[in-house]
């Protein structure tokens, strides 16, 4: 073989541009323009690390000789930071915060992008200020966003009128009629917000599954607490034979804290029947800056939680709304539980569960409840 290899004809022509973006879905063959044979394994290249990477592969040439070959590619971060800011940002003269801390500025890969506000302003003086928010990540990608800062006097008006004219409800029975097929199940998700539940009435109404909140933590690094109705809820649904899943509202800011979250959840649910996934629910978007983490880090935290859950024999799922699934989360490798309150979702990704409303009405529950569809 060594002699054959020494005399083998090797023709591998590569593209001029041997670079790709971070986490791009790209194969060995995508860099080859011409080859005198066939690749043995045209695999997807690991693009999860920035910098130079060696790509090794083998192919069988036209003389039927197995040829080892390698080339190097450069993995770059070419995605600019995100600035979550509209055309106007309003504060009052009583504002004591920091615009740089309160306006979300985040990146796909850089845990701490450099953010600055260009232009002069004074939040203690009424007026409008035309400003530019600029964000730069550690790969040199830049985003700018022009906006108007509006500073007003604090309002004295008391807008506490209640608006209960024609409250809008979504009947569980209507969702069931519209969405129930041989390949769907219709269910709900609940927490202490739903109060005391009549589980027999819920079962009779046709509810086919329920996700139950197990608990949360008291903010970043805070102590854990069990949802006030968790034990009552899981015992009730187990008793009437409705399959249950679990969700945990997390404040994890690194993989270690996400793993600790999962271990705590496992301890709470070990004595009960859980047939559906344990879902990771992370929603601290309004103060995302406080976490000092990139979108990729946020995804790795979710994966660390879900990996821990599945190692213990349960299924895992990621819960999030359409906007953040499209703009923040990378693929965790787990099922998605999509939150999108609409009659027909236009979310293009894959999802196993769809939370379609938060104003559901079902027999056995006094207040509103989220209604969900499971796709089999």
Image (tube, rainbow, N blue to C red):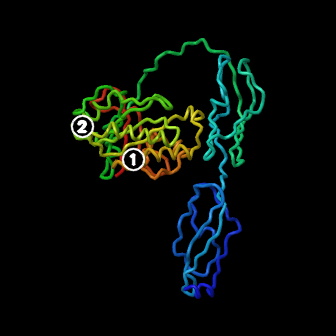
Residue 324 shown left or right of residue 194 in the figure: right
Front label number (2 vs 1): 1
Residue 202 visible in the snapshot:
yes
Residue 327 visible in the snapshot:
no
Residue picked out by circle 1: 316
Nearer to me, 45 or 176:
45
Residue in the picture at 72% in, 47% down: 140
Residue picked out by circle 2: 203
Residue 182 disc label? none
Instruction: Say which element carries label 2.
Output: helix
Above or below, 81 against 31 in this view is above
Residue 357 shown left or right of residue 3 in the figure: left
Above or below, 180 against 100 in this view is below
Tag 2: Cα neighbours inside 10 Å, few (<14), some, or many (≥20)? some
Snapshot quadrant of residue 28: bottom right
Q: Mark 2 or 1 closer to N-term?
A: 2
């Amino acid at each position: 073989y060594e002699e054959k290899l020494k005399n083998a004809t090797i023709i591998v022509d590569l593209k001029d541009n041997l670079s790709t973006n971070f986490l791009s879905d790209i194969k060995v063959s995508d860099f080859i323009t011409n080859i005198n044979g066939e690749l043995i394994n045209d695999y997807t290249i690991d693009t999860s690390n920035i910098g130079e990477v060696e790509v090794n592969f083998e192919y069988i040439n036209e003389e039927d000789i197995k040829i080892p070959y390698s080339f190097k590619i450069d993995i770059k971060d070419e995605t600019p930071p995100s600035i979550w800011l509209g055309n106007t940002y309003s504060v009052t003269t009583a504002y004591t915060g920091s615009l740089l801390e309160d306006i979300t500025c985040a990146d796909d890969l850089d845990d701490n992008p450099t953010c600055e506000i260009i232009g002069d302003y004074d939040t203690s003086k009424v007026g409008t200020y035309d400003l530019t928010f600029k964000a730069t990540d550690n790969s040199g990608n830049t985003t700018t966003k022009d906006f108007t800062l509006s500073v007003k006097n604090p309002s004295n008006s008391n807008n506490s009128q209640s608006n209960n004219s024609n409250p809008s409800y979504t009947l569980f029975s209507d969702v069931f009629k519209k969405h129930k097929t041989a390949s769907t199940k219709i269910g709900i998700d609940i927490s202490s917000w739903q109060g005391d539940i009549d589980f027999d009435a819920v079962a009779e109404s046709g509810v086919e599954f329920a996700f139950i909140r197990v608990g949360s933590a008291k903010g970043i690094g805070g102590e854990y607490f069990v949802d006030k109705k968790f034990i009552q809820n899981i015992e009730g649904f187990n008793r009437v034979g409705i399959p249950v899943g679990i969700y945990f509202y997390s404040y994890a800011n690194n993989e270690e804290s996400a793993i600790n979250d999962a271990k705590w959840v496992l301890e709470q649910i070990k004595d009960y029947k859980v047939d559906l996934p344990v879902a990771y629910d992370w929603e601290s978007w309004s103060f995302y800056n406080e976490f000092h983490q990139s979108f990729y880090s946020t995804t790795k935290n979710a994966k660390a939680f879900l990996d821990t859950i599945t190692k213990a024999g349960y299924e895992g799922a990621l819960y999030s709304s359409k906007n953040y699934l499209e703009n923040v989360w990378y693929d965790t490798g787990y099922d998605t539980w999509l939150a999108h309150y609409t009659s027909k979702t236009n979310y293009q990704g894959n999802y196993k569960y769809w939370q379609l409303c938060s104003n559901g009405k079902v027999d056995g529950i006094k207040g509103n409840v989220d209604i969900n569809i499971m796709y089999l």
